[in-house]
Image (cartoon, rainbow, N blue to C red):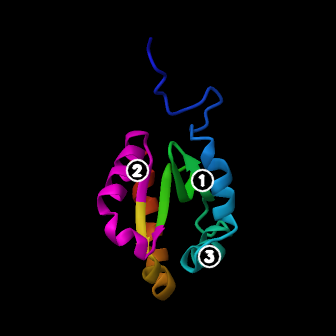
Amino acid sequence: MKLNTNPITLRGHNKYLLELRQLSRVNRNNLTKAESILWYQVLRKHYLAYKFLRQKPINRFILDFYSSKLLLDIEVDGDSHDNKLNYDQGRDQILANIGIKTIRYTNNEVIYYLDSVLQDIKYKINQRLYEI
């Protein structure tokens, strides 16, 4: 018997663990300070001309901010990620295997250097347009 390992549903959506649906809803209502800044000052307003979703479940992960048009995941990492380098790299590789590129910023980068983060996101979006 062959297992279905296709990451896309028949309707063209990314598959995810159903348990993540409720957790992603909770996360949307409890953004960190840095996530809130990035969402309300940059991504929510379509300032970058691309739609991003908050706390999007894909596969077995919840992506902080996801653009389906760009296949781009923007992660804002707090102190809890300091000891999770291997996990984050593995997660990023699994997402890359299904075509999703991940870019990461620390809480401090978003809170204290939002203009630089915004410029970097614009640059990476332009790069991404040539990759997809």
Please rate how many residues cluster around mark 1, counting C-alpha atoms within 10 Å: few if below 14, some from 14 to 19, many from 20: many
Q: Are marks 1 and 2 in contact (CB under 8 Å)?
A: no
x, y percent for residue 84: 34, 63
User: Nearer the observer, disc 1 or disc 2?
Assistant: 1
The residue at the point 53 percent across, 56 percent down is 63
The N terminus: image quadrant: top left
According to the picture, the residue beneath numbered tag 2 turns out to be: 130
Asked if residue 77 lies in the magenta stretch, the reply is: yes
- Is residue 68 left or right of 123 when viewed as pictured? right
Which residues, given as a range, are shown in magenta?
Answer: 76-102
Residue 26 vs 116, above or below: the answer is above
Please rate how many residues cluster around mark 3, counting C-alpha atoms within 10 Å: few if below 14, some from 14 to 19, many from 20: some
According to the picture, the residue beneath numbered tag 1 turns out to be: 56
Q: Residue furthest bottom?
A: 112
Q: CA distance from mark 2 to mark 3?
A: 29 Å
Asked if residue 40 lies in the magenta stretch, the reply is: no
Q: Which mark is residue 36?
A: 3
Q: Are marks 2 and 3 in contact (CB under 8 Å)?
A: no
Name the foreground residue: 126 vs 13: 13
Inspect the image, locate mark 3, and give the three-letter code of the amino acid beneath it: Ser
Is label 3 in a helix, a strand or a loop?
helix
